[in-house]
Amino acid sequence: MSVAVGLVETDLTVAAGGTVGCTVRVRNTAAVVDRFTLDVVGDAAPWAEVEPATMNLLPGTEQEARVTFTPPRAATVPAGSVAFGVRVRGRENPEGSVVEEGTVTVQPFVELAAELVPRTSQARRAARHQLVIDNTGNVETTVEVLPADPDRLLTFRVLPVAPVLRPGTATFVKLRVRPRKRFLLGPDRNLPFQVAVTRPDAEPITSDGLLVQRSVLPAWSPRVVLVAAAVAVALVGLWFAVLKPTVQSTAKEAAKVETKELSQEVAEVKTQASEAAETAEKAEKVAIVAAGASPKPSAAPSPTTETGKGNGNGPGAQGGTLDNADPETAADFRVATSASPTTANEFTLSTYRPADKKVLWVTDIVLQNPHGDAGLLQVRRGDTVLLETGLNNFRDLDYHFVQPLRFSAGQPVTVAVKCANPGTTACTPAAYFAGQLVPVAPTPSPSPSR
């Protein structure tokens, strides 16, 4: 061993984004002049620097170097203790390198950002929003989502109320906004509200939103009612002016014809009855003369006639309706990524695979790049690239499909990232997917041939 190495400070503490250093002493224990190279190994190496990195030492002499640690203020460097080693290698004996170890503790920090999507909604009964919370800190934290409106005209439903935010991720919180009262007709009403993200010992983060409440009946309803009333009045006027007199005249003429026919029938019946009475009276007189008796007056029967009519209506049948509701198959999920910078054509893959015998139909995709990373992002179905966009081109980018995208266990959803950030800062874009997760229809068995 031709070199002796010693660290003056072995336990260091530094804030994320800050700087801390320690002194390393190098002594040439060989009998010849040697050139030594110093570097840092371990997880702290990407954000460590040695000055000077090389030194020439005479036999028996020593020299000090300064090791500086500057961890970035990003989620890529988690809070906690990180082990490191200062390695010293001699040119005369490169195989006999010496490593002196130490630890540097990175202090935790939390940085949050919140965005309400959409910021403005329109509804008659209830509206749906999403609160996107980004944790760009290096430690996990729990927050509370508290919506409120200044006039207390709205009710809210939050899911989840207290989400756990992991470092370097975006969390989606569902928010349902409902007006306390509805109105039948009138202009739209603007109902502002705020959503606060709070945590202990920190100022809350607020996002403003607006619900445009619409009337229960559409704005064109009064026009339709007026048009219907005008049509009804026109029909009533047409009835009294044209149709009713015509119907009455036709009914009177028909009644006159029927009455005339009935009068003729009654006259014929009376004539026949009179003739029958006369015949009966003559026969009675002949019978009395033949018997030697005086005839007795007889009362002629008065014929009577009766007429009658009748009609009736039967009851109608009543129908019924049946409302059917499909089972709820809505599904949404988020795919987070973390890709180290690279100059090669290499992609870091993050995959969501549907369960067996399930088919995922995706109708909406929201791409998130809250840190403004540089590089390339692809959305794939298995090995097939469906979408490709540069990370420099967007912070938030959404797609909506008329024809949904189909994914299955054999062709899963894959988010591929090629990071082109300068230095060692990783790319952490995310993708949110929404659609329907439905069972695969069973394959019908072939019918036997006859």
Image (tube, rainbow, N blue to C red):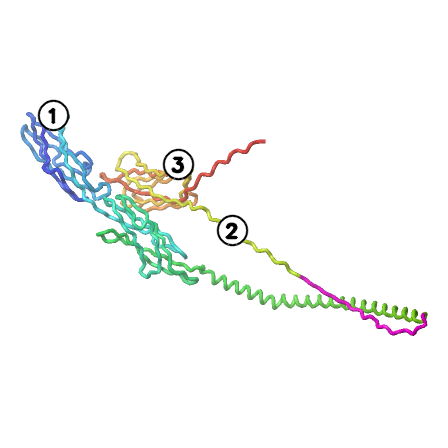
Distance between mark 1 and mark 2 Cα atoms: 92 Å
Residue 221 rendering spot, x and y as whole percentages: 47, 61
Q: Is residue 5 magenta?
A: no
At x 54%, y 33%, the residue is 447
Q: Nearer the viewer, residue 200 or 174?
A: 200
N-terminal label among 3 and 1: 1
- Res 107 quadrant in image: top left
N-terminal label among 2 and 3: 2
Distance between mark 3 and mark 1 Cα atoms: 58 Å
Q: Which residue is mark 2?
A: 322
Q: Does 80 appear above or below 262? A: above
Q: Does 360 appear above or below 226? A: above
Q: Nearer the viewer, residue 302 or 363?
A: 302
Q: Which residue is mark 3?
A: 409
**Magenta region, main secondary structure:** loop
Q: Residue furthest left?
A: 60
Label 3: element kind: loop
> What's drawn in magenta, residue-wise?
291-311
Q: Is residue 446 visible?
A: yes
